[in-house]
Image (cartoon, helix red, strand yellow):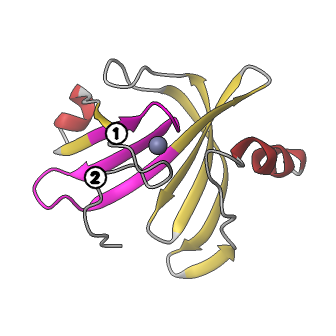
């Protein structure tokens, strides 16, 4: 689960901007957002451990979030998308979990990037 701090966006290598949210501040979590990739990075504020990263996208005017945390990935539908650094997401609905849950491999994690996310999600959503 422990990942060394990585400050640049892992997809485009540009530095993501600090996009703090008060709800995350309360949990001692730092939020960074890459506008190029629509990728969000959450770090523990004392150790700079990468807790999770997410890629956002829209398909048919619906917002989805692909989130990776350790060996688990989760696809979410977001009814009321937030604004990075301004307000948090609301109305999150889990669509599917991939990878390991309590060390049991459920489903292999597809390699999803900002470039291929729409194509991959369309396939996943077809089977929901
Ligand atoms: Zn990026």
Q: Is 14 located above or below residue 107 in the figure?
A: above
Q: Quadrant of residue 46?
A: bottom left
- Count of labels in the image: 2
Q: Secondary structure at mark 1?
A: loop
Q: Residue furthest right?
A: 126
Nearer-N-terminus badge (2/1): 2
Residue visible at 44% across and 68% down in the picture: 70
Counting other residues with Cα less than 10 Å from the Cα at mark 1, is it few (<14), some (14-19), or many (20 or more)? many
Quarter of the image that includes the N terminus: bottom left
Q: Is residue 5 left or right of residue 113?
A: left
Q: Is 63 located above or below residue 55 in the figure?
A: above
Q: Is residue 23 left or right of residue 97?
A: left
- Cβ atoms under marks 2 and 1 closer than 8 Å: yes
User: Is ligand 1 closer than 8 angstroms to the Cβ of mark 1?
Assistant: yes
Q: Position of residue 105 (x, y in %)?
A: 63, 79
Q: Is residue 112 magenta?
A: no
First to last magenta residue range? 31-54
Judging by the rendered image, the residue that carries numbered circle 2 is 7
> Which numbered tag is attached to residue 16?
1
Q: Is residue 41 magenta?
A: yes
């Amino acid at each position: 689960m422990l990942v060394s701090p990585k400050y640049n966006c892992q997809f485009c290598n540009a530095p993501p901007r600090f996009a703090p949210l008060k709800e995350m501040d309360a949990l001692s979590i730092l939020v960074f957002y890459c506008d190029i990739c629509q990728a969000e990075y959450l770090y523990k504020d004392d150790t700079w451990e990468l807790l999770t990263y997410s890629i956002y996208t829209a398909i048919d005017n619906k917002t989805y979030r692909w989130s990776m945390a350790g060996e688990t990935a989760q696809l979410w539908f977001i009814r009321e998308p937030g604004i990075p650094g301004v307000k948090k997401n609301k109305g999150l609905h889990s669509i599917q979990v991939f990878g390991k849950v309590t060390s049991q491999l459920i489903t292999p994690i597809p390699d999803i990037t900002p470039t291929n996310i729409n194509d991959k999600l369309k396939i996943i959503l077809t089977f929901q």
